[in-house]
Image: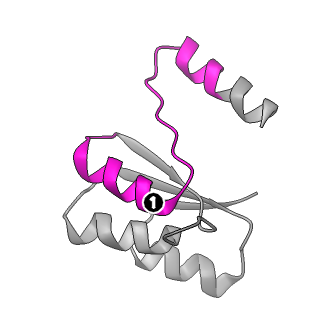
Amino acid sequence: MRGTTCRLEILRGTGHAVDVVHDGASANAVIAAENFDLVILDLNLPEMDGLDVLRAMRARRNHAAVFILAARGTPEERVKGLDLGADDYLIK
């Protein structure tokens, strides 16, 4: 978590607002309530899978850019994420 905190502080230090949530249900609720320019989305989230969060975003016609950052990186998984509306799929 230390490395993640450092990266968040770098983003904040360059003037970016950063919100962090740790489960899919919270992510879905925050994304529904706020406007974001970019969502960096993990797929392995408790309570609600990241792909379900993305699906819900796009169903609400939320067009924020979405980068999936995931440990899962088979070609089929990447295609599925991109087909659901992710702008990019990055493997950890």
Q: Quadrant of the N terminus?
A: top right
Q: Residue at x 71, y 73 (%)?
A: 72
The residue segment tinted magenta is 8-36
Q: Residue at x 36, y 58 (%)?
A: 28
Residue 51 colored magenta?
no
Question: In the image, residue 64 lies at what x, y percent?
Answer: 32, 50
Question: Is residue 9 visible from the viewing direction of this image?
Answer: yes
Q: Residue at x 28, y 67 (%)?
A: 58
Image quadrant assignment for residue 42: bottom right
Describe residue 52's horizontal placement relative to residue 29 as left or right: right
Image quadrant assignment for residue 5: top right
Q: Residue at x 63, y 19 (%)?
A: 9
> Toward the viewer: 33 or 11?
33
| Amino acid found under the numbered disc labelled 1 | Asp
Question: In the image, residue 36 lies at what x, y percent?
Answer: 33, 40
Question: Is residue 85 visible from the viewing direction of this image?
Answer: no
What residue would you read off at disc 1? Answer: 87
Q: Quadrant of the C terminus?
A: bottom right
